Image (cartoon, rainbow, N blue to C red):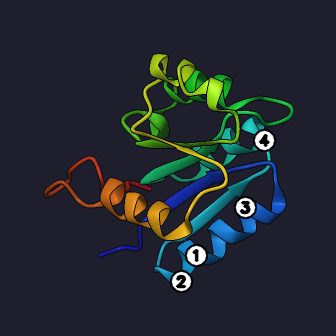
């Protein structure tokens, strides 16, 4: 089975690096983006099995990224895990097609558990499979 691919869209380099290292240690292929524009470029290059998304990023924020991703062939039906340091934004995420919302700071082991669950294959050719 091919390695699962995760797109990490996070403007804080330290958090992005932590996520990349932890995910790669678990066998995931990680694509990184510093903002929503870079995230859309990465999304167009490879269909991820999951997007880990910060909402407040420069250039294009996470909200705008989600709306744009819904119109991309590689963005349809991809689960999104939102990370945010602003709890007041959690209510707003109810209007977005996200599967999970976690607050920053986060426990990396808890996050990895959610990643494993969200990327688990749902059967042959199921939602968890990447088609790049």
Kindly give the residue lying farthest to the left in the view shown: 123
Measure how far apart labels 1 and 2 are at the Cα level. Answer: 5 Å
Kindly give the residue lying farthest to the right in the view shown. 59
Label whose residue precedes the other's in the sequence (2 or 4)? 2
At label 3, counting other C-alpha atoms closer than 10 Å, the crowd grade (few under 14, some 14-19, many 20 or more) is some
Circles 1 and 2: CB atoms closer than 8 Å: yes
Q: Secondary structure at mark 3?
A: helix
Residue, x 76% and y 44% (percent of image)? 38
Rendered image: mark on residue 16: 3
Residue occupied by mark 1: 22
Residue identifier under label 4: 35
Q: Secondary structure at mark 2?
A: helix
Front disc: 3 or 4: 3
Alpha carbon separation for disc pair 1 and 3:
10 Å
What is the x, y in percent for residue 53?
Answer: 61, 43
Per the model, the C-alpha gap separating discs 2 and 4 is 24 Å
Seen as rendered, the residue at the extreme bottom is: 25
Residue 21 point in image, percent of width and height? 64, 77
Dot 2 corresponds to which residue?
A: 25
> In front: mark 4 or mark 1?
1
The quadrant of the rendering that contains the N terminus is bottom left
**Total marks drawn?**
4
Residue plotted at (41% across, 73% down): 3
Q: Distance of mark 3 from mark 4, alpha carbons?
A: 11 Å
Crowd class of label 1 (few under 14; some 14 to 19; many from 20; radius 10 Å): some
Q: Is residue 44 left or right of residue 95?
A: right
Splitting the image into 4 quarters, where does residue 32 fall? bottom right
* Lower position in the chain sequence, tag 4 or tag 1: 1
């Amino acid at each position: 089975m091919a390695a699962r691919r995760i797109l990490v869209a996070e403007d804080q380099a330290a958090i992005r690096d932590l996520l990349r290292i932890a995910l790669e240690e678990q066998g995931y292929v990680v694509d990184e983006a510093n903002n929503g524009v870079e995230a859309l470029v990465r999304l167009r290059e490879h269909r991820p099995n999951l997007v880990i998304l910060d909402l407040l990023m420069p250039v294009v924020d996470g909200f705008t990224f989600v709306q744009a991703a819904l119109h991309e062939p590689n963005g349809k039906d991809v689960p999104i895990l939102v990370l945010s340091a602003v709890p007041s934004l959690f209510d707003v995420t109810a209007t977005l097609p996200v599967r999970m919302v976690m607050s920053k700071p986060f426990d990396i082991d808890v996050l990895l558990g959610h990643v494993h669950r969200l990327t688990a294959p749902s059967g042959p050719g199921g939602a968890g499979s990447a088609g790049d």
